[in-house]
C-alpha cells in the first residue's frame, strides 16, 4: 500500500480495520495472505527479501498484527506472543534481574501472581502486593522496596477495582520505576494507558482483542524504542512468538473490536442494573455504577465501563456454585472477552492458584463476561438460574 493509500483519519475503528492490512501487490487481494512459510529465500547470501529469513524472527502475518496492535494503543511498537502470560514473562525477563522487585496490585490476576511468585520469585525477583487504590500505600511500597516495576491491572480481575493510572505513573516515576498496565479487561477501545503515561501495556489478546474464543495470544505494546528492543529480543531468542495462523485470527478479530465493545458495554450495564434488583445479591462490582468506589476515576480514564461484571451472593459459596452451574446462555467456563457470555467461579477456576493467599477471591463471588447476545435472553437466563436458590 502506498503512502497516499493509507487512511487519513485517526478514528479508532478505522485504525482497527486498516492498520497492518496492506493489500497484496501481486493480485490486489484486500485481505493480506496468510504466510505459513517457516523460511524465506534471499536474493543472495546476506541480502534478504523484505527482511525475512526465518519465521521465529520475522513473519509477514505476525508483522501485520503487530502493526495493528501498536496502532490500537496509539504506539509505535507492538510485539505479539503465544499467550498473555508469555507476553508478561517477556516483560519480566527483559527488564528485571535477580534482586529486583515488583510492586503489584493485591488483587492481580492469579496467573500473573503465579508467574511472578513461583517462576520469577525462584529466580530472585521479589514482589510486594499492595492495594493500588491506596496511593500512600503504593508510594511506601515503591520506596521501601526500591522497586524497578509497578504492575497495574485496571479494572482488576475479578474484583473490578479501579486504579488511577496517571497518579500511579507519577508515583512510579518519582521512585525510578517503570509502569506496566494490563489493559486486557478494558481493551484499547475503552482505555489508553500509554496516553496516561504508562511505559508498557500488556494484553491477553485471547480475550477482547481476538474476541471469539478461538485463539490464544498475548501482546506487549510500548512507545519506548529501548524497551521494545529488549522485549523483542526475548520474543526472538526464547521463541514465544505468536504463530502465523494465530496472528491471522487475532488481527481478524481485532478489526471488529469497536463495535463489539459497544455491545459488550450495553449488555453489561443492563445486567449490572438487573443484578442490583435481586434480593439474593450482596454486592454488584461494576465500575459503571455510580456507587462503585472507582466510578469517577473510571469515568475519567475509560471511554465506557466494559463488559465484565462481578457479583457476590448473600448465600455464600453454595449460592454462587448453584447459579454458576444453572445458566444456559451463560456458559460455565474460564476466560473472558468473547462474543458469547461466560460464567466463572474464580475461587475454584481462574484464581485457584491464589487460594490461601492475600490475593484469594471471595467464595461467594461470580465473574460474568457479558457477551453480545440479545440482552433480554441474558437476563432471562440469569433469572432462571437465580430461581434455583
Image (tube, rainbow, N blue to C red):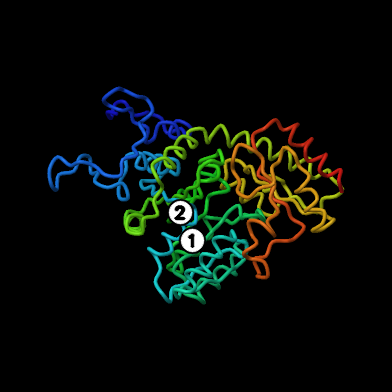
Label 1 belongs to which residue? Answer: 170
User: Does dot 1 land on a helix, a strand or a loop?
Assistant: helix
- 94 above or below 123? above
In depth, the one of 232 and 171 nearer the eye is 232
Q: Residue at the spot x=71%, y=50% of the render?
A: 310
Label 2, residues with CA under 10 Å away: few <14, some 14-19, many ≥20: some
Quadrant position of the N terminus in the picture: top left
With 333 as the anchor, is 116 left or right in this view? left
Vertical position of residue 100 compared to residue 371: above or below: below
Taking the view exactly as shown, the residue that stands out farthest to the left is 44
- Report if the CB atoms under discs 2 and 1 are less than 8 Å apart: yes
Chain-order first, disc 2 or disc 1: 1
Q: Is residue 360 above or below residue 290?
A: below
Q: Residues within 10 Å of mark 1 (few under 14, many from 20)?
A: some
- 181 above or below 211? below
Q: Residue at x 29, y 22 (%)?
A: 27
Numbered disc 2: secondary structure: loop
Question: Which residue is identified by label 2?
Answer: 197
**Left or right of residue 151: residue 107:** right
Position of 382 with respect to 332 (left or right) is right
| Total residue callouts | 2
Residue 196 x %, y %: 48, 51
Query: Where residue 266 sits in the image (x, y, percent)?
Result: 66, 35
- Rendered image quadrant of residue 177: bottom left
Residue 335 is marked as none
Q: CA distance from mark 2 to mark 1?
A: 8 Å
Amino acid at each position: 500500500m502506498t503512502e497516499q493509500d493509507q487512511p487519513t483519519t485517526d478514528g479508532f475503528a478505522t485504525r482497527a480495520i486498516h492498520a497492518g492490512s496492506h493489500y497484496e501487490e501481486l493480485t490486489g487481494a484486500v485481505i493480506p495472505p496468510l504466510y505459513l512459510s517457516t523460511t524465506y529465500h534471499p536474493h543472495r547470501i546476506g541480502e534478504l527479501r523484505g527482511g525475512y529469513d526465518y519465521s521465529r524472527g520475522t513473519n509477514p502475518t505476525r508483522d501485520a498484527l503487530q502493526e495493528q496492535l501498536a496502532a490500537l494503543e496509539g504506539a509505535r511498537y507492538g510485539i505479539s506472543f503465544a499467550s498473555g502470560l508469555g507476553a508478561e514473562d517477556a516483560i519480566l525477563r527483559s527488564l528485571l534481574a535477580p534482586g529486583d522487585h515488583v510492586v503489584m496490585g493485591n488483587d492481580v490476576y492469579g496467573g500473573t501472581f503465579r508467574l511472578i511468585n513461583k517462576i520469577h520469585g525462584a529466580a530472585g525477583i521479589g514482589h510486594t502486593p499492595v492495594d493500588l487504590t491506596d496511593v500512600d500505600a503504593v508510594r511506601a511500597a515503591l520506596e521501601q522496596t526500591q522497586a524497578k516495576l509497578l504492575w497495574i491491572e485496571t479494572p482488576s480481575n475479578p474484583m473490578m477495582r479501579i486504579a488511577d493510572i496517571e497518579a500511579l505513573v507519577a508515583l512510579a516515576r518519582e521512585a525510578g520505576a517503570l509502569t506496566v498496565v494490563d489493559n486486557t479487561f478494558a481493551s484499547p477501545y475503552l482505555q489508553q494507558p500509554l496516553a496516561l503515561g504508562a511505559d508498557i501495556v500488556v494484553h491477553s489478546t485471547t480475550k477482547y482483542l481476538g474476541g471469539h474464543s478461538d485463539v490464544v495470544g498475548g501482546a506487549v505494546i510500548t512507545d519506548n524504542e529501548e524497551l521494545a528492543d529488549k522485549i523483542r529480543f526475548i520474543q526472538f531468542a526464547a521463541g514465544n512468538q505468536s504463530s502465523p495462523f494465530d496472528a491471522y485470527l487475532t488481527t481478524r478479530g481485532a478489526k471488529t473490536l469497536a463495535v463489539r465493545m459497544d455491545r459488550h458495554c450495553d449488555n453489561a450495564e443492563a445486567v449490572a442494573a438487573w443484578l442490583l434488583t435481586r434480593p439474593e445479591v450482596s454486592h454488584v462490582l461494576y465500575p459503571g455504577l455510580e456507587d462503585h468506589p472507582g466510578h469517577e476515576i473510571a469515568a475519567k480514564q475509560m471511554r465506557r465501563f466494559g463488559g465484565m461484571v462481578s457479583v457476590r451472593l448473600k448465600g455464600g459459596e453454595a449460592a454462587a456454585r448453584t447459579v454458576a452451574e444453572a445458566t444456559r446462555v451463560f456458559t460455565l467456563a474460564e476466560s473472558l472477552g468473547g462474543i458469547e457470555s461466560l460464567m466463572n467461579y474464580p475461587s475454584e477456576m481462574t484464581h485457584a492458584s491464589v487460594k490461601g493467599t492475600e490475593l484469594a477471591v471471595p467464595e461467594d463471588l461470580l465473574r460474568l463476561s457479558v457477551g453480545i447476545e440479545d440482552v433480554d435472553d441474558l437476563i432471562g437466563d440469569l433469572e432462571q438460574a437465580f430461581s434455583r436458590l
